[in-house]
């Protein structure tokens, strides 16, 4: 019997998208069905992100809109799940919009919590676990292209980057049993998927220590190889790599398997050693540059992308210039770039003053963005004349006669459909580009 209709909205990273899929699977098994229409829902879930203050502000704004839903239809349950639920806990109940608060390790408890929720008894479960990996749950895929799926290989994070709230919202690091990962990869292949992205906050520290036999112990390079072997038609991506942990073994494994995509997302955060030290990143500028050189020497065509934070505590103009010069030296293919946002409870919030004025942060961020646009364009211009094997992911938004997909190095190619379909591999030749896209033709 159908117990109710769930509408779910997801904010934040790929891990969060996968978590929403895990929630849907758990709720489905308990008798709930998904609806894409908020007006039709009995339960509205917002799976939230807490990484920067503006992410949280957006969600608070959204909650105000849910207040209207509740006013119009008194019986709808509003639940906040994920990172913001973990960070704000029962404070989220203060506004009387939210009826249910579930942290990232509480999703198995959702069916019980929903049943127990009444206007007078809001439900909250924000317990963090040392074991939960949802290993046995096959996520209910939310994507609609049926081409690319996420598999979480670990949860939580044991690093203490001083700016970052994630270790507090997602708890301690734990790796998932590799047999369940392989099973999930086989399942998506059977369902017709062509690409998998292995997700973790720091995939390079994946380590399965089997409780029964050490023969089954596995590190990330070994896991990557095992997933690559599931099917030669399944492309394998992974994210995120930590510069301090990415090993030669991982780089060599990538080189050995043509279905492991030639792309590494390697967040640098800053090019200044003083800032890296204060951020507790546990590597130096020199170490980072050496890792990039190693990657390029083994996999010359590897796409390298990054994350950068502008205006961290005490950042001087010289520190900022170090970031620009590192970006230029590496020549990143693309980057996610942010202004530092102080997060309550983090080491930086406790120890350092958020002392770079707002307008200086903004100006530095703009310089970083302008530089990256130039680097992305240069990197794309080098692609002109090259051929790429592309996995078709969808129809171009700008032109219904064109398709798009990503090359192994993660660059987006757009090309005339020519009778091809989503989910196929095609070879294309790059003819021109913008800083974001490779305009191509079929080979
Ligand atoms: N302020 C700004 N950016 C942050 N990130 C993480 N924490 C913060 C913060 N407090 C960025 C980092 C990270 C990415 C996911 O978000 O660059 O790699
Ligand atoms: Fe993902 Fe971090 Fe945002 Fe949580 S806080 S959703 S882990 S980006």
Image (spheres, rainbow, N blue to C red):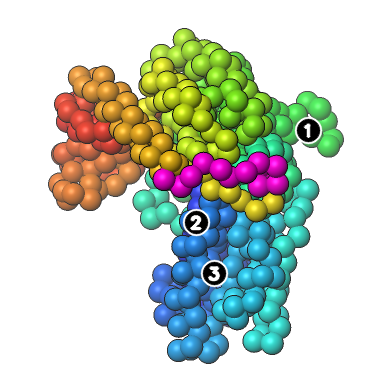
The label shown at residue 209 is 1
Q: Residues within 10 Å of mark 3 (few under 14, many from 20)?
A: many
Sequence-wise, the earlier of marks 3 and 1 is: 3
The label shown at residue 55 is 2
Give the structural element (helix, strand or loop) at label 1: loop
Q: Is residue 204 left or right of residue 7?
A: right
Ligand 2 lies under 8 Å from the Cβ of mark 2: yes
The label shown at residue 45 is 3
Q: Is residue 17 visible?
A: no
Distance from disc 3 to disc 1, alpha carbons, whole Å, reads 35 Å
x 71%, y 83%: residue: 121
Q: Is residue 354 within the magenta segment?
A: yes
Q: Nearer the viewer, residue 325 or 89?
A: 325
| Residue 62 locus on image (x, y percent) | 46, 69
Q: Is residue 392 left or right of residue 357?
A: left
Q: Residues within 10 Å of mark 1 (few under 14, many from 20)?
A: some
Magenta range: 347-359
Quarter of the image where one finds residue 404: top left
Instruction: Give the position of the C terminus as an image quadrant.
Output: top left
Give the structural element (helix, strand or loop) at label 3: strand
Sequence-wise, the earlier of marks 3 and 2 is: 3
Depicted 280 relative to depicted 396: above or below: above
Q: Residues within 10 Å of mark 2 (few under 14, many from 20)?
A: some
Q: Nearer the viewer, residue 58 or 209?
A: 58
Distance from disc 2 to disc 1, alpha carbons, whole Å, reads 36 Å
Q: Is residue 109 within the magenta segment?
A: no
Tell us which disc is closer to us: 2 or 1.
2
| Residue 73 locus on image (x, y percent) | 48, 89
């Amino acid at each position: 019997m159908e117990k109710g209709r769930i509408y779910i909205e997801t904010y934040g990273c790929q891990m969060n998208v996968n978590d929403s899929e895990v929630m849907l699977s758990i709720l489905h098994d308990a008798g709930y069905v998904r609806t894409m229409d908020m007006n039709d829902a009995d339960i509205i879930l917002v799976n939230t992100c807490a990484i920067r203050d503006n992410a949280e502000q957006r969600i608070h704004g959204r909650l105000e809109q849910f207040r209207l839903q509740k006013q119009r239809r008194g019986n709808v349950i509003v639940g906040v799940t994920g990172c913001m639920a973990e960070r704000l806990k029962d404070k989220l109940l203060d506004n009387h919009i939210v009826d249910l608060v579930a942290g990232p390790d509480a999703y198995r408890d959702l069916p019980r919590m929903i049943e127990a929720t009444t206007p007078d008894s809001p439900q909250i479960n924000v317990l963090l676990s040392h074991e939960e990996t949802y290993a046995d749950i096959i996520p209910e895929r939310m994507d609609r292209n049926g081409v690319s799926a996420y598999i979480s290989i670990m949860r939580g994070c044991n690093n203490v980057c001083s700016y970052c709230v994630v270790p507090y919202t997602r708890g301690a690091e734990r790796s998932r049993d590799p047999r369940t990962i392989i099973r999930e990869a086989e399942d998506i292949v059977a369902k017709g998927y062509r690409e998998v992205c292995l997700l973790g906050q720091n995939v390079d520290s994946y380590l399965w220590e089997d409780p029964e036999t050490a023969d089954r112990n596995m590190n990330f390079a070994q896991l990557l190889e095992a997933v690559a072997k599931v099917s030669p038609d399944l492309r394998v991506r992974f994210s995120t790599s930590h510069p301090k942990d990415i090993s030669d073994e991982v780089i060599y494994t990538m080189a050995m398997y043509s279905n492991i995509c030639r792309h590494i997302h390697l967040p640098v955060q800053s090019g200044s050693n003083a800032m890296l030290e204060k951020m507790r990143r546990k590597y130096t500028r020199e170490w980072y540059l050496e890792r990039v050189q190693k990657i390029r020497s083994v996999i010359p065509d590897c796409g390298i992308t990054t994350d950068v934070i502008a205006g961290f505590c005490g950042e001087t103009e010289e520190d900022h210039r170090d970031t620009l010069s590192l970006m230029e030296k590496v020549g990143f293919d693309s980057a996610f770039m942010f202004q530092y946002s102080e997060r309550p409870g983090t080491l930086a919030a406790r120890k350092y003053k958020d002392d770079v004025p707002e307008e200086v942060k903004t100006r530095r961020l703009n310089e970083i963005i302008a530089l990256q646009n130039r680097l992305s364009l240069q990197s794309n211009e080098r692609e002109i004349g090259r051929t790429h094997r592309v996995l078709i992911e969808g129809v171009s938004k700008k032109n219904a006669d064109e398709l798009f997909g990503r090359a192994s190095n993660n660059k987006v190619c757009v090309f005339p459909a020519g009778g091809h379909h989503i989910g196929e591999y095609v070879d294309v030749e790059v003819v021109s580009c913008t800083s974001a896209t490779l305009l191509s033709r079929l080979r």
